[in-house]
């Protein structure tokens, strides 16, 4: 019979995390396109670029800069992390307006007149 306090499975072990940023790149995105499979979430990050379309009508080109593929568990952890940082930002700076032109950083690029 063993002592209930001596069970090594109940002890938490400290793990040191090292972060290697030597291959990291940084990019900016003002748009994301998502698609899914039963196993994964695919996220294309890029920039909406205004450009003249046929007959000089306004058009937008979505220029994809990065694709991130995650399993559903990773996607949920990302969603939780983003929700937390957005909540913290809004507590300090006020509510972020979505679906309107503009916003905290000025909004999407526009065609020149």
Image: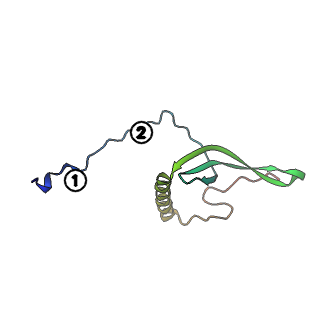
In three-dimensional space, the C-alpha distance between marks 2 and 1, rounded to whole angstroms, equals 28 Å
Question: In the displayed structure, does residue 54 sit left or right of residue 98?
Answer: right
Q: Residue at x 71, y 52 (%)?
A: 109
- For discs 2 and 1, the disc positioned in front in the rendered view: 1
- Mark 1, Cα crowd under 10 Å, few <14 / some 14-19 / many 20+, is few
Q: Residue at x 26, y 46 (%)?
A: 13
Q: Secondary structure at mark 1?
A: helix
Q: Residue at x 53, y 51 (%)?
A: 39
| Label 2 sits on residue | 19
| Label 1 sits on residue | 10
Kindly identify which numbered label has been placed on residue 74. Answer: none
- Residue 85, image x and y in percent? 48, 57
- Residue 48, image x and y in percent? 70, 51
- Residue 67, image x and y in percent? 60, 44
Counting residues from the start of the chain, the first of labels 2 and 1 encountered is 1
Q: Residue at x 60, y 59 (%)?
A: 104
Question: In the displayed structure, does residue 108 sit left or right of residue 22?
Answer: right
On screen, 15 above or below 86?
above
């Amino acid at each position: 019979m063993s002592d209930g306090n001596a069970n090594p499975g109940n002890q938490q072990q400290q793990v040191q995390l090292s972060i290697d940023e030597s291959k990291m790149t940084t990019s900016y995105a003002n748009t994301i396109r998502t698609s899914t499979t039963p196993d994964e979430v695919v996220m294309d990050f890029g920039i909406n670029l205004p450009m003249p379309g046929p007959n000089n009508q306004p058009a937008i080109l979505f220029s994809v800069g990065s694709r991130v593929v995650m399993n559903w568990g990773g996607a949920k952890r990302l969603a939780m992390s983003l929700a937390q940082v957005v909540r913290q930002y809004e507590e300090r700076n006020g509510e972020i307006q979505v679906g309107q032109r503009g916003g905290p950083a000025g909004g999407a690029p526009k065609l020149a007149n």
